[in-house]
Amino acid sequence: MGFKAIVLSALAAIAAAESSADGESTVTGVVTVVIARTGNSFVLAGRDDPNGESFYVTDRDQNERFADYEGAAPLASGSIVEVTGERVPLMFKPGMLARRIRLLGSVELPPAPVVELSELRLGMSDNRRVAIKGVVRRVTVSGGFTSMHVSNRQGIARVRVQGRCPSLSRLVDRDVQVTGVAMSEFNFRAEFMDFWIEASGADDVAELEPKPEGHRLEFEGQVVAVGGDGAFYVCSDGRGMKVVSNGPRSPRVGERVRVKAFPDRERGVVVYGDADWTVLAPPSPVPAPEPLMVSPKGRLMVSEDLAFIDQQFKLVEVKGRCAVSEDGALVVRVGGSVEVRVEGPAVDRNAVDEYALGPLATVRGICELEVQTVSRDGKTFGDVLSVRVLTSSPDDVKLVRDSTYRAAYVREISRHLFRIVLLVLAVALVAVVWVRLRERRERMKRRAIEADRKRIAADLHDTVEQYLACAKMVMSGAATKGGMPEDVRKAFEVAADVLAQAKREVRDAVMNLRVDAASGTTLAEMLKATAARVSKSGAVEVRTKLRGIGDDFTGPRMLDAAAIVNEAITNAIKHGRAKNVIVVSDPAADGGFVLRVRNDGEVFDTSKAVGPETGHFGLSGMRERAKRIGATLAIESAGGWTEVRLDVKGMRSV
């Protein structure tokens, strides 16, 4: 594959989008640092300006060592190399995946420019040689490199020195200048997080003349509280101090300790970090907490010179009424306008609703103030932005449910009850509206069905029934004329009976159509009405004793059952010449009922009953109706009584 030569400064200036183009490039430059922890990466700068633009080089196949390296000596800072590989985009600047590296020589690197930490935090010097000045706060030897923390007025910088260099521990609390390459750290979303300085060895860390600021301070005091992440609070000569230990271990509350720590600024005030401490005396009772000082105007009482704030990091007691902040944190209002945010294990996240009702609270904990400072005429002035109290145990917050709280509680309960009542009323209203709409739809449906039934009944009455009546009259008249053969006369009589039965069937159908099956009439009511009508005619005495007929037995089934009873009563009068008829119903085990029509007329022999072939349709019609409603019809005679029995199955058995 062919390649094109390109100077390093031109490669470094290529935009990330352009650097992903196909093809290889060859560049020549000087190595500013070899990344020892990977062994297959280094930073390359221009030969004419090693402190200028640089880019990151790594092995194309991600081997532990460069696969194609030509050189008698290993790569090191100052090596002059020729690199052939593919340009790739990185976060801030383009880089290169190396296919071949050839060592050309070496050169001594010039001094690196001293830069501010603020410039490094912006990623502006990524992959460039820089130097920083500050005080060494911590040295840790781990694995194949040595870590250092170097601080100055702008903050703390992390330094990673290649190789195990325990000798650097002597530089703790001394002024140094560190030379190395600024490297950037990103999270998994490719967001810039922080920087560190990659130094080639211990020679890149030079000790400087000491300066008066930024060095470790030493003080003694009693531990009044212990926080998380190695933090603890010391009261020394009436002042409160926050100390962050150099390790995860912290002293116990009440112990007297000697502390050596570096001053930092946190939330606008001085704290002490990277602390080493020793215990001077065993635990003893800590002083009682001081009440939080609030002026009559409702402001915190602090000194004008915020370098010393009377209650900062001290154990205080706060009394006031509870509230809840926008983010759901517990707040205690003191003096009307001062809001103290309460944090720590004493805050019950499940009691936010109770805090919102405003009970009185007594809170015990460490006072932390966030301040905004302004320097003028060599003095520091400012204002308090926020106050928080850090609790250490659940007993540090005590609530008093006074009359104000109880009144708020009653109001809250009343609001909840009112909402519940409104919800119940709304549900009830919706249910009522739904029922009314359903009833209205049912009424409209019944009216439409009833109108159709009446129309059909009127049509049957005015047409078919009248034609049948006329035909019967003709047949009956013909049967009474003399001079007609006997078989012909009998045929006319049978035809007349058939037409009469057809007329009755049509009349029954018309009656059924005119009865609204959904009007609320029950079978028991219909049977009682039939018994009363027949008894009133004087033909026979009909008595009823009805039990077990369910209200759900309605519609066509009810009409067919009523027609069977009507036919049984008619047959008892017409054929049996009965004097008494009893209609009885009893409940059945399957949820249905048994309907009996008994009469004291002549014994009825079903085997001799005439059928449709002779023009009599009564018994066959009753059986057809019984079959249609899923019932069983039986006729029995015993002891001078004839019984028509109808076994109606329950709805579950149908």
Image (cartoon, helix red, strand yellow):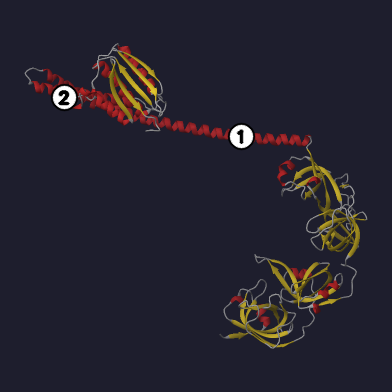
Quarter of image, res 440? top left
Q: Which mark is residue 125?
A: none
- SS at badge 1: helix
Query: Is disc 2 in contact with disc 1, using a CB cutoff of under 8 Å?
Result: no
Residue 346, percent from left and from top: 77, 47
Quarter of image, res 420? top right
Between tags 2 and 1, which lies in front? 2
On screen, residue 89 versus residue 157, left or right, reads left
On screen, residue 299 versus residue 104, left or right, reads right
- Above or below, 289 relative to 514: below
On screen, residue 477 versus residue 84, left or right, reads left
Q: 10 Å neighbourhood of mark 1: few (<14), some, or many (≥20)?
A: few
Of 546 and 33, which appears nearest the observer?
Answer: 546
Q: Which mark is residue 495?
A: 2
Q: 10 Å neighbourhood of mark 2: few (<14), some, or many (≥20)?
A: some
> Circle 1 sits on which residue?
422
Name which residue type carries label 2.
Ala
The single residue placed furthest to the right in the displayed view is: 237
The single residue placed furthest to the left in the displayed view is: 483
